[in-house]
Image: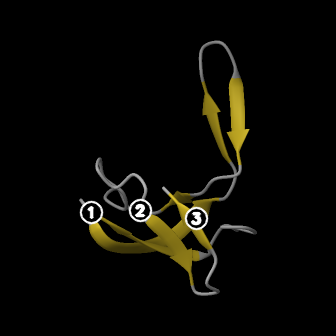
């Protein structure tokens, strides 16, 4: 999704976890590896079961119709 922001509501339909929605808690996620730190324009969504193994490739969307992929 373009222009993702903290507090935005996002939903997805995954093969494992089915239809789930949640609020974006961080729109720019930093991932730290031993050799380097990366910041991605991706979103963390509230809820521990928002996405589960097997949901890869699921469509993600918000109320404005923007889409992305897990």
Q: CA distance from mark 2 to mark 1?
A: 7 Å
Disc 2 on helix, strand or loop?
Answer: loop
Q: Residue at x 59, y 72 (%)?
A: 67
Which residue reaches farthest front? 57
For the residues labelled 2 and 3, say whether their Cβ atoms are less than 8 Å apart.
Answer: no
Query: Which of the two labelled residues, at mark 3 and mark 1, occupies the earlier sequence position?
Result: 1
Q: Categorize mark 1 by other alpha carbons within 10 Å: few (<14), some (14-19), many (20+).
A: some
61 shown above or below 51:
below
For the residues labelled 2 and 1, say whether their Cβ atoms are less than 8 Å apart.
Answer: yes
Q: Categorize mark 2 by other alpha carbons within 10 Å: few (<14), some (14-19), many (20+).
A: some
Residue that mark 3 sits on? 68
Which residue reaches farthest right? 3
Q: Residue at x 35, y 73 (%)?
A: 20
4 shown above or below 8:
above
Q: Quadrant of residue 9?
A: bottom right
Residue in the foreground of this view, choosing between 26 and 13: 13
Residue in the foreground of this view, choosing between 68 and 6: 68
Residue that mark 2 sits on? 58
45 shown above or below 38:
below
Which residue reaches farthest top? 35
Disc 3 on helix, strand or loop?
Answer: strand
Position of 69 with respect to 14 (left or right) is right
Give the number of the disc on residue 1: none
Q: CA distance from mark 3 to mark 1?
A: 16 Å
Disc 1 on helix, strand or loop?
Answer: loop
Q: Categorize mark 3 by other alpha carbons within 10 Å: few (<14), some (14-19), many (20+).
A: some
Residue that mark 1 sits on? 15
Measured from the top left, where is residue 1 in percent x and y?
65, 67
Q: CA distance from mark 2 to mark 3?
A: 9 Å
Measured from the top left, where is residue 40 in percent x and y?
69, 44
Measured from the top left, where is residue 49 in percent x and y?
31, 59
Q: Quadrant of residue 33?
A: top right
């Amino acid at each position: 999704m373009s222009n993702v922001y903290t507090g935005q509501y996002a939903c997805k339909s995954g093969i494992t976890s089915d239809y789930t929605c949640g609020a974006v808690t961080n729109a720019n996620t930093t991932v730290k590896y031993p050799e380097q730190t990366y910041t991605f324009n991706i979103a963390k969504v509230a809820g521990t079961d928002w996405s589960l193994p097997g949901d890869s490739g699921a469509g993600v969307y918000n109320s404005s119709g923007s889409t992305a992929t897990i």
